[in-house]
Each structure stands twice: as structure tokens, then as C-alpha cells.
Image (spheres, helix red, strand yellow):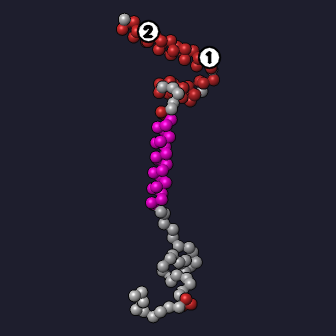
């Protein structure tokens, strides 16, 4: 049933190395064969980096401790080197809190 029509081979007649042409062989001048980039793996790696960056940015936005406007002002101040004066930062925060409080009071008095 599993008999092959060709001559039977014994274990000693089976070649130990693959025949030439089945795997890349060195060139006759002794230099290794030309390598080709594996575009599937490169694409998968690039996609992984992109997904990681998107997920990281999303998580950072969701758990940010300040609003977008406050964060932008803070980043701009640090970039310009104006973050050295803590008292100015405290004054800005107090002014922002006072403005928010005034808005809340105005909306409450308008409802009454």
C-alpha cells in the first residue's frame, strides 16, 4: 500500500546534506548569498509600534490630572524656561480658581 514504485533506499543511501539548489548556497567566489528583507516582519513590527503609540497617547489623555488648556500652558511655560518661579505658578492657579468660582457664582445667581 505504501510501497513506492521506485527502487527502495536504505538508510545509508539517503543523502546527509540537501542537494544543491534546495537551500541558498554560497556563490562560487565564496561570498554569502544576497539577503532579502522580510517585509512581513517589518510591517508587523511597524504596526506594533503604531498601535502602541496610539494606545499610550489615549491612556495619557484619559488619566491626565489637568484640563487640556492647563496642560498646554504648563508645557509652554516649561518649554520657554519660565517654570522656575513657583510663586508665579501659584498666582496663576489662584487666578484661575477665582475665575472659575466667579463663573459658578454667576450661574447660580442667574438660576435664582
Up-down: is 4 above or below 24?
below
Write the residue at 54% across / 86% down: 15
Q: Is residue 44 above or below residue 71?
A: below
With 104 as the anchor, is 12 left or right in this view? right
Q: Position of residue 20 (x, y in %)?
A: 50, 82
Mark 1 falls on what kind of element?
A: helix
Q: Quadrant of the C terminus?
A: top left
Crowding at label 1, few (<14), some or many (≥20) Cα neighbours within 10 Å? few
Residue drawn at the location 47% of the way across and 14% of the way down: 100
Q: Is residue 27 magenta?
A: no
Q: Nearer the viewer, residue 107 or 83?
A: 107
The image position of residue 103, as x and y in percent, is: 43, 12
Could you tell which of marks 1 and 2 lies nearer the N-terminus?
Answer: 1
Mark 2, secondary structure of its residue: helix
Q: Nearer the viewer, residue 20 or 84?
A: 20
* Alpha-carbon span between mark 1 and mark 2: 27 Å
Mark 2: few/some/many CA within 10 Å (<14, 14-19, 20+): few
Residue 16 visible, this orientation: yes
Q: Is residue 76 visible?
A: no
Tell whether 77 sits left or right of 55.
Answer: right
Q: Is residue 32 left or right of residue 41?
A: right
Residue found at x 63% / y 23%? 84
Residue 105 circle label: 2
Q: Which residues are magenta?
A: 39-60
Comparing labels 1 and 2, the label whose residue is closer to the camera: 2
Let me know if residue 49 is in the magenta part: yes
Q: Which residue is mark 1?
A: 87
Q: Position of residue 32 (x, y in %)?
A: 56, 73
Quarter of the image with the N terminus is bottom left
Amino acid at each position: 500500500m505504501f510501497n513506492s514504485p521506485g527502487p527502495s533506499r536504505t538508510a545509508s543511501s539517503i543523502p546527509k546534506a540537501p542537494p544543491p539548489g534546495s537551500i541558498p548556497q554560497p556563490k562560487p567566489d565564496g561570498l554569502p548569498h544576497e539577503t532579502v528583507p522580510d517585509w512581513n516582519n517589518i510591517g508587523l513590527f511597524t504596526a506594533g509600534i503604531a498601535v502602541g503609540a496610539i494606545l499610550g497617547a489615549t491612556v495619557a489623555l484619559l488619566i491626565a490630572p489637568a484640563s487640556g488648556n492647563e496642560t498646554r500652558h504648563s508645557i509652554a511655560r516649561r518649554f520657554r524656561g519660565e517654570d522656575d518661579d513657583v510663586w508665579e505658578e501659584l498666582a496663576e492657579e489662584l487666578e484661575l480658581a477665582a475665575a472659575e468660582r466667579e463663573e459658578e457664582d454667576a450661574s447660580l445667581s442667574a438660576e435664582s
